[in-house]
Image (spheres, rainbow, N blue to C red):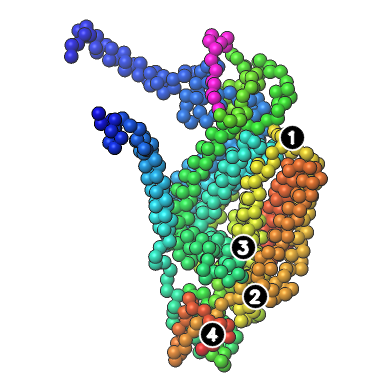
Amino acid sequence: MSSNDPAKPSRLDPEPVPRRDFLGKASLWAAAATGVFATLGIARLPKAAVLSSPSRKFKVTLPENLPEGQAFVPPGRSVALFRDKEGVHAVSIVCTHLGCIVKPSATGFDCPCHGSRFAADGAVTKGPAPAPLPWRKVTVDGSDCMVDEDASVPPGTKA
Amino acid sequence: MVVLAPPPEQHGALRRFFANLRATPARVKDSAFRGGKPDTDRTRSTFVFGNVFLHLHPVRTHRWSLRWTATMGLGIASLAAFLITLITGVLLMFYYKPHPAIAYDSMKDIAFVVPTGNLIRNIHRWAANVMVLTVILHMARAFYTGAYRAPREFNWLIGMGLLVLTLGLSFTGYLLPWDQLAYWAITIGANIAQSPREVTDALGLTETFDIGGLQKLLLLGSDTVGEEALIRFYLLHVMILPLGLVALLSVHFWRIRKDGGLVRPVDADRRLGPVHAADYPVFTEEPRKTYQLAAVVRGKSGAVARGPENTVPSMPHLFYAELAVTMLTIAICVALALVSDAPLKELANPQVPENPAKAPWYFLGLQELVAYSAFMGGVGIPGIVLLGLGLIPYLDREKDGTGEWFGGPGGKELVLQALFVGFGAALAIEAFAIRYGWLREWIPDIPQLWITVFNPGTVLTAIYAAYSIWLVKRHQSTRAGALGLFTCFLCGFVLLTVVGVWFRGPNWDFYWSPSDWPGH
């Protein structure tokens, strides 16, 4: 009889992992793995590889008679351009607090949303803004200026 | 197959056909409503458990739950407001187009071209406002009557989830008109999501761990509020959040029943006194056979060992009360919609912020805090509040005062005192900050981290926490501390909201009245 032969297990012998247990466990693990992979895949979706934001590099010609200390904001852009004897510089006009557009004023910049005030060089003088307004990169080419809103330069850098 | 039936009569089949045709309306009714008229105890029961929409209700309701002061109908009013927004929202979707180029135009169409469009939009807006209000009041009711206590702890957490979803629905709906109000409120909201940068910048971690930037990116799908942001907010507003809300609502209702019905004092039966058979027909018919709805519920069940003496059939007593509250909510929303138009400002202009740019009223308390520190006001303190609310049922394991308004050690006097402390502290700190400014004005070069940790919002939170700890010691009761803390935060919320709504003008400066605002 084969069942008496210890080397040859009979199909009547108990299985190491019962079939029902195997099926149950396999389904559980499959479900768990599917859940993990599906979640990871879904989590990747909302962050696109390329953002649809417009280019933030632009060319602008400053008005001939722009007085020293007077801000020039190119239409549709979020930087204020200044020209003095040392050259041209650009200060971001997006408030570092919560993203409102600050208004150039006699003392520097005022934010309409939560009352932050900035000095002419962008330093915070009042209100909740956590950081100074950053300066943006400007390159002068004849009468034209190239402004890159994505590149910051240390305050005081003029071109 | 051998047909055993007798051969049909000559004209019988046709006669039977017409007889069946005549009987069809009655039979359709019988097959749809199997229980018959709900005029006996038995048919009233089947009316509830035989109906898929009603069976989340118990078959019989305790008389205590039907008292006006037990709930004030706030939960049902919230549900009614949600259903109103659901129906009016679907109607608005016929015309609304979620793209920046045409969203504002479609709002104008709804307001001026579509028959009843403006009224439907007004009702939607007002019902959303009513829902936020009733959800907050409902939460206060559950807190003050101790309804969060065991075995209802988990349902309190579900309720918190519902509060967050309600606020999320309101916030996402705010962007859709694509007017100035919407654009700048969402710009501010998205930057609040980015505000953890305030901390990571101060610690120099932003390069490696920019959780704030990621949150903003996921919310807007871009760097700025544009078409990606609009479609995301639309998707959240009409699909993701409502589905989540409905799912949580179902659990919320189900758990009310499974946790033993609405909360009531242990001696509710004695206090209600004997039942007047004429008022509350408890058993309207002589039971011909003993029947009861028995369920074996594992764990602690609030429903065991209570006789039916003080319960009445849910149909009609509970359902008519619920219907009354629903109709009242609809009446209020429609009345408000008729007298007050939902605002629609000029087309969104990314170059010129609205001044002042105000969020909807229920976020103005937070905006007031945000005007001191973006991270603490927008993320830190709301997070602390939610954590505290979630912990309450697990820390307060007491029994004293369950089911009573302001029940527990200290009671009404404690809540009254907490009202003074809560309002007083908030008023004092606001007045101080408005009059004297804060750290940035005194020491311009102070590191931002100091302001993030130490600002009017965190000071107020610390005062409330200290007061609450003192209450725990004084009354030797966690419930006393919770009563004080909840009341204080409610006071702080109300006061900051009032300041934000009526006393803040251009540049978020303090003004006694909008008539003092400078022209701009």
Circle 4 Cα neighbour tier, 10 Å, few/some/many (<14 / 14–19 / ≥20): many
**Residue B255 image offset from top left, x and y in percent:** 56, 34
Residue type, mark 1 in image: Asp
What residue does disc 2 label?
A124
**Observer-nearest residue: A18 or B479?**
A18
**Observer-nearest residue: B64 or A8?**
A8
Residue type, mark 4 in image: His
Evaluate if marks 1 and 4 touch, with contact meaning CB atoms under 8 Å apart. no
Relative horizontal placement of residue B249, taking residue B263 as reference (left or right): left
Q: Which mark is residue A89?
A: 4
Task: Look at discs 1 and 4 and give the one toward the viewer.
Answer: 1
Q: Which mark is residue B375?
A: 3
**Residue B371 image offset from top left, x and y in percent:** 65, 64
Gap in angstroms between the C-alphas marked 3 and 2: 17 Å
Circle 1 Cα neighbour tier, 10 Å, few/some/many (<14 / 14–19 / ≥20): some
Whether B117 is drawn above or below A90: the answer is: above
Question: Which residue occupies 75% across, 37% down?
Answer: B408
